[in-house]
Image: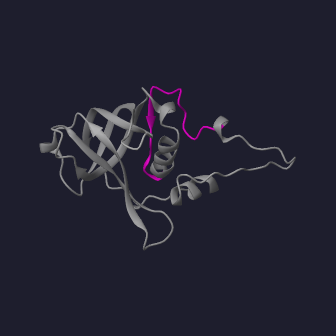
Amino acid sequence: FIRNNAKAINPRVELIFEDTNNEIVDFEDFEIFDLSKDIIEVNDTDYGLWYMDASSNPKKYEGKMVSLNIKLIEDIKEYENALIMGRCAMTCCEDDISNIGLTLVGVDKELIKADTYYRVKGKIRCIEDEEGYMTCLLYVEDIKEGNKPEVDLVYFS
């Protein structure tokens, strides 16, 4: 998934791939996750791929139920029941580790502990952010303690 690795480094990069007949390959037709399922179960090794896909194509996840294993990244103090939760990602090298997460709405902050993973299930809603880009929010329907992934860092391949 060269495309996902490049987008992890620069989300605005445009890549064009050709097949053996020099025809352009349309990645819009290629789905990484089965969107026809009632719940999209994002396993620990696919979190980075899901995050990049949801960031690049948020509208296709509108109204979809997802289940993720994530941890607290940041409290959003301005809102009573909103947090940013996600994972740490290495986008190119050990010196380039950053948090990648999404805003969760409907969370009882008193129950969330730092450095603890949670299995979160909720419905995706898309909104326009301050810069005019579409982004995903996760409206939580169920949250319980999860398990720390075997590999704590997220990779994009």
- Looking at the picture, how far across and down is residue 93, in whole percent? 48, 71
Determine whether 128 is above or below 87 in the image.
above
Q: Nearer the viewer, residue 83 or 131?
A: 131
Q: Residue at x 16, y 46 (%)?
A: 77
- Looking at the picture, how far across and down is residue 10, in whole percent? 53, 58
Q: In which quarter of the image is residue 124?
A: top left
Q: Is 53 one of the magenta-colored residues? A: no
- Looking at the picture, how far across and down is residue 102, in whole percent? 35, 45
In the picture, measured across the screen, residue 38 lies left or right of residue 84, that is right
In the picture, measured across the screen, residue 153 lies left or right of residue 33, that is left
Q: Which residue is drawn at 18% across and 52% down?
A: 113
Can residue 146 be seen at all in this image of the molecule? no
Q: Nearer the viewer, residue 59 or 39?
A: 59
Q: Which residue is drawn at 38% across and 40% down?
A: 129
Find the magenta span and give its range: 30-45
Can residue 69 be seen at all in this image of the molecule? yes
In the picture, measured across the screen, residue 99 lies left or right of residue 27, that is left
The overriding secondary structure of the stretch rendered in magenta is loop
Q: Which residue is drawn at 50% across and 48% down?
A: 52
Q: Is 37 one of the magenta-colored residues? A: yes
- Looking at the picture, how far across and down is residue 122, in whole percent? 34, 32
Determine whether 60 is above or below 87 in the image.
above
Q: Which of 145 and 10 is in front in this view?
A: 10
